[in-house]
Structure formats: C-alpha cells, structure tokens
Image (cartoon, rainbow, N blue to C red):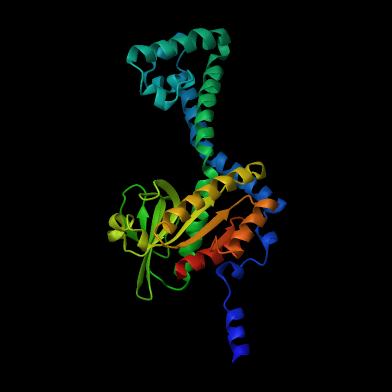
Amino acid sequence: MRLSLEKDIVGKKKPYCMHLSGSSDLRTTYEEIRAGFVALALEKNRRATPFVEQARSLKSAASQARTPADLLKIEIIQPALLTASGLSDKAIGHLLPQDRIEAIQGLISKYLEPAGPAFLEELVYRFLLTRGDTLGGSMRNVGGVMAERKLTRATIANLSLVKIPYQWLHSGSKEWLKGKDEDADVELYLTGLSWFRKGKVRTMIYNRKVPFINKNVDFCLLNCSPQELSSAINNPALYIALGELKGGIDPAGADEHWKTARTSLTRIRKAFSDRKIKPHIFFVGAAIENSMAGEIWHQLEDGTLSNAANLTDADQVVSLCSWLCSL
C-alpha cells in the first residue's frame, strides 16, 4: 500500500515539469536571441512600409513645386509638410492654423531653401526623420505585442486541437465573436478568449486593470462567461490564474524585466493572500538569463509560481497554454 501511494505521488507531476527539468531549460540560448532580434527587425520593416509609401507619394505630389515656397500652394501635402517640420501627429492637434503655417514657413526658410535644387529630397528626408520617431515609439512595446500574439495563437491551437469551441474579444468592436478554424491573423485584434470545457466556462482577458489590485495584469483567467466578466472582475474568488508576460528579447534588459514582473507578481499574490485566496500565478519571458532562470526555478519549486515558460521555446509555450486551457 505504501509503495502504491508513493508511486501515485511521484506520478503526479507539477504542471511546469511537463516542459521543464531544471533552471537551465528556462535560459534563452544565443540562437533564440538571434532569432528574436531578426523577428523584431522584420516587424520593424513591415511597420515602416506605410511610411516609405507615404514618402514616395509626398515626393510625387511635391514635384509640382518649382521652388520651396510653392509647396504652400499644394493643399494635399500640408499635413506632410507639418510632419517634415518635426511635429508629431499629437503636437499638430494642439496647434492653431497660424501656428501650423509658421512651422511650415520655418521648414522652408531654414532647411528647404538652403538645399537649393535638392529641396524635394530634403523634404522627403525630413518627413521620414519624423516618421522614424513615430515608428521608434511604436516599436518600444512591439516585443510585448508579438509575445502576446504568440501565446494567443498557441492557446487557440490547443483549443482547436481538441475541438473546444471558443469566443474571442475584438479589440476594435469590443464584441465577442465566435472562433473559427479558418480564422487567420485573429491574434492581431484579439484582447480576450473564452471557452467551455467539461461543464466549466473560462474567460481569459488581456491587459486588464484588476480593481482590488489597482494595477494592470497581463493575463487573467476567470471562472465566468464573457457576459459575466464586467462583474466577475471585481470578485477575487472567481480568478483562476494570473500571469505576467515579458516579450523583450534583449539580454541587457532581462534582469530589469524580471524585476518589474517579480514586483507585479508579488503585488498580485499579496492582494489575493489578504483575502485568503490562492489562484495560480505564472510567468512567461523571452529573455531569461542564468540568475533569473535560477530564481524562477526556485519559485516554481517552492510553489510561489505555479508555472513558467521561455517564450522562445515553442514546446514550453504549447505546454503552458495547454495547462491554462485545462484549468
């Protein structure tokens, strides 16, 4: 009897043991870091394409001007001239019409006229310079966005594989839509998932402010339907799992990302422990260094974390998402 009981205990693996055997499995390899940087570069080029096309259109439209001053007469390029002046879209919205004209006149007198016959090229360069700043701003959190999409696609794949129907929340319309096997790029617009399995309804919401924590949490899995979400999010007892995601791939920022995530996870645990509730807590990161991996593994072993995965390892991501779908 004792041997049988011990065998049963050994046979019940903790969820993270399905894809991790030690802290070394959590570390991000050089090959994965390199692939991550390449993926970011490709995404940056993809996002830059509209700006490049705008610059081409600007050059074509502005070619009607014989002198820099003639640019003021071409109505359709006035917004682009403001951009070339160094003004962001947000800044332009705060300016009066006369201030906008003054900004364009400053561009013409200080930069375009001194460029002589090459004023069109100068205009395009300065337009792209400002648009580059816009692109840089959007790229700061692109790692997190791409990471969220990767987890989303893995979760949907798990649900589809076992024929579990699901609904997803559209970021634009705020409607819950029925999931379909042929859905392509659904992760680009998805901010929530809901499914029904074995008599249980589960709803996972992204980047939502949890009222009793008073902070945003990357992932919250609740025991409720989408229709009940607005009230359920205020009830600590309905939370099944909460997690933090850090998608940055740069090893130089790995420790800082983990410190931020660790602070958030500690805050989450305290909010629930004060109410004598213990939901599952998990962490997923792209850049995980040696010391960080050791600390995460220790938290897994002592039960502080229920699960963890390295985002760059497809098997780990699939395993963690499968676990979430089974809760």
Hey, which residue is sitting farthest right in the picture?
30
> How many marks overall?
0
Above-or-below relation of 227 to 127: below
The percent position of residue 24, horizontal first and vertical second, equals 70, 60
Above-or-below relation of 264 to 136: below
Hey, which residue is sitting farthest bottom in the picture?
1
Q: Residue at x 56, y 8 (%)?
A: 114
Quarter of the image holding residue 26?
Answer: bottom right
Image-based side of 279 in relation to 257, left or right? left
Above-or-below relation of 110 to 266: above
- Front-most of 196 and 175? 196
The percent position of residue 212, horizontal first and vertical second, equals 37, 50
Q: Which residue is drawn at 55% across and 45% down?
A: 260
Above-or-below relation of 122 to 319: above
The percent position of residue 164, horizontal first and vertical second, equals 41, 71
Whether residue 67 is visible? no
The percent position of residue 12, horizontal first and vertical second, equals 57, 77
Image-based side of 84 in relation to 302, left or right? left
Quarter of the image holding residue 309?
Answer: bottom right
Whether residue 314 is visible? yes
